[in-house]
Image (cartoon, rainbow, N blue to C red):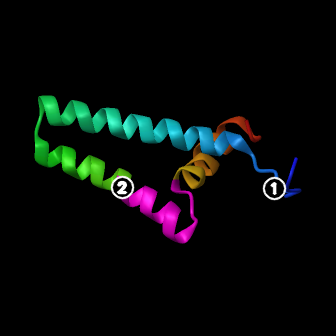
Amino acid sequence: MIFSLDSPLINKAPKIFTVRLGLIFSFTGLLVAVFVSEVVSLYVMGFLVLFAAVECVLNFCVGCYIYAWIVMPLFGEWR
């Protein structure tokens, strides 16, 4: 190894949950665009872009926050 960079360990479960939420938003946006309305689909995809922008600019993971409020009370521990 050329560089010895210590990366902090993070819990991957909230990030996996966030990726799955993004997939659901993307698939929902596609289905809504095909079967319902392109305008409604733009709103669904707009939320996806908004959440990605918040993650990028503010370094705040909205999906991780949702994970902490939904999964933690149900299971009582990080999964």
Asked whether 59 or 40 is in front, the reply is: 59
Main SS, magenta residues: helix
Verify whether residue 6 appears in magenta.
Answer: no
Q: Secondary structure at mark 2?
A: helix
Q: Which residues are magenta?
A: 49-62
Residue lying at 60% horizontally and 46% vertically, measured from the top left: 67
Residue sticking out furthest to the front: 2
Residue lying at 34% horizontally and 38% vertically, measured from the top left: 26
13 with respect to 28 (left or right): right
| Image location (x, y in percent) of residue 12 | 70, 42
The quadrant holding residue 4 is bottom right
Q: Amino acid at mark 1?
A: Ser
Q: Amino acid at mark 2?
A: Val
| Image location (x, y in percent) of residue 71 | 63, 40
How packed mark 1 is, by other alpha carbons closer than 10 Å (few <14, some 14-19, many 20 or more), is few
Residues at marks 1 and 2, CA–CA distance in whole angstroms = 27 Å
| Residue occupied by mark 1 | 7
| Residue occupied by mark 2 | 49
76 with respect to 61 (left or right): right
Residue lying at 52% horizontally and 40% vertically, measured from the top left: 19
Do the residues bearing badges 1 and 2 touch, measured as CB atoms within 8 Å? no
16 with respect to 62 (left or right): right
The quadrant holding residue 8 is bottom right
> Looking at the image, is mark 1 or mark 2 earlier in the sequence?
1
Verify whether residue 55 appears in magenta.
Answer: yes
Residue 27 tag number: none
Residue 12, relative to residue 48: is it above or below? above
Q: Secondary structure at mark 1?
A: loop
Quarter of the picture holding the C terminus? top right
| Image location (x, y in percent) of residue 10 | 76, 50
Residue lying at 44% horizontally and 42% vertically, measured from the top left: 22
Asked whether 54 or 36 is in front, the reply is: 54
